[in-house]
Structure formats: structure tokens, C-alpha cells
Image (cartoon, rainbow, N blue to C red):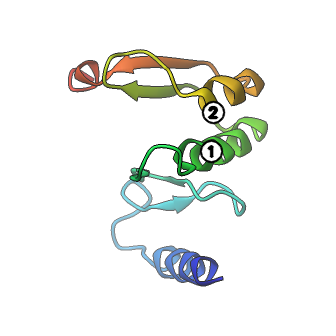
Amino acid sequence: MLSLEIDADIITSLSEKTDKGDQTEIKEIHPESLIFYNSVNIAVGKQGTGKTLLFMREILKLDRLKMTHLILYITGDGKITDDTFIYLSQTLETPYSDQFYDVISIL
């Protein structure tokens, strides 16, 4: 339960941050979500270690809460080949777009 303790410490510490206002504050989206407003979320690891499942679980939570507008899936070639994403995305109500990573530099 070390992760839960760390998450609680982060939320407590950042909730006390008021000097910069809400625009830069990393804020909780929902108590049951590991994804935060104003944050970058990255999973690094070997193929087949559950990275997509981890993210899809969090995305599905936000999808059910109607808290997402569009999901960008960034790949090296602009094609989604991850079976976990392909199967779990069938349950998404939020639209998603697969993008080649060079396109993102334009955004």
C-alpha cells in the first residue's frame, strides 16, 4: 500500500499549494483516478507488462464519469496494434484518434 500512501501525500501537499493558482496546479480529477489535471502520464516498460491495461483502466474510469473529450493514442507509425487497447477501446464512449508521433510536435 506504499503507492496509496504516496498518492495521499502528493494530493495533500498539492492541495495546500495556493500561491500559483489553479492554472498550474496538478489537481485530482476524481478520488479513484490515478490521472490528474495538468499532468503528463507515462508508462515505461517491456512489452507485455501491463502498461496499456494500467492506462486503459484509468481512461475507462474517466470515460464512465463523462470526464474525457478525446483520447490521443500516439504511436511510432500512426497505427494502433496493441491488442489490449483494441479490445478495451470497444467499451469507450469517448472518441479516440491514433496519431503518428511527428504530428504531435505540430500541436
Question: Residue 11: horizontal and vertical position, in percent?
Answer: 55, 74
Q: Quadrant of the N terminus?
A: bottom right
When asked about the image quadrant of residue 79, the answer is: top left
Q: Secondary structure at mark 2?
A: helix
Question: Pointer 2: what residue?
Answer: 84
Counting from the top left corner in percent of width and height, residue 67 is at 67, 38
The mark nearer the N terminus, 2 or 1, is: 1
Residue type at numbered disc 1: Leu
Which residue carries the number 1 mark? 53
- 59 or 51, which is in the foreground? 51
Q: Are marks 2 and 1 in contact (CB under 8 Å)?
A: yes
Occupied quadrant, residue 70: top right
Report the Cα–Cα distance between label 2 and label 1.
7 Å
Task: State the image coordinates of residue 49 (x, y, percent, origin top left).
Answer: 53, 51
- Which residue: 78% across, 38% down? 64
The quadrant of the rendering that contains the C terminus is top left
The correct choice, above or below, for 96 with respect to 8 in the image is above
Left or right? Give the position of 53 relative to 106: right
Query: Neighbour class for label 1 at 10 Å: few (<14), some, many (≥20)?
Result: some
Does residue 12 appear to the left or right of 17 in the view shown? right
Question: Is 4 placed above or below 32 here?
Answer: below
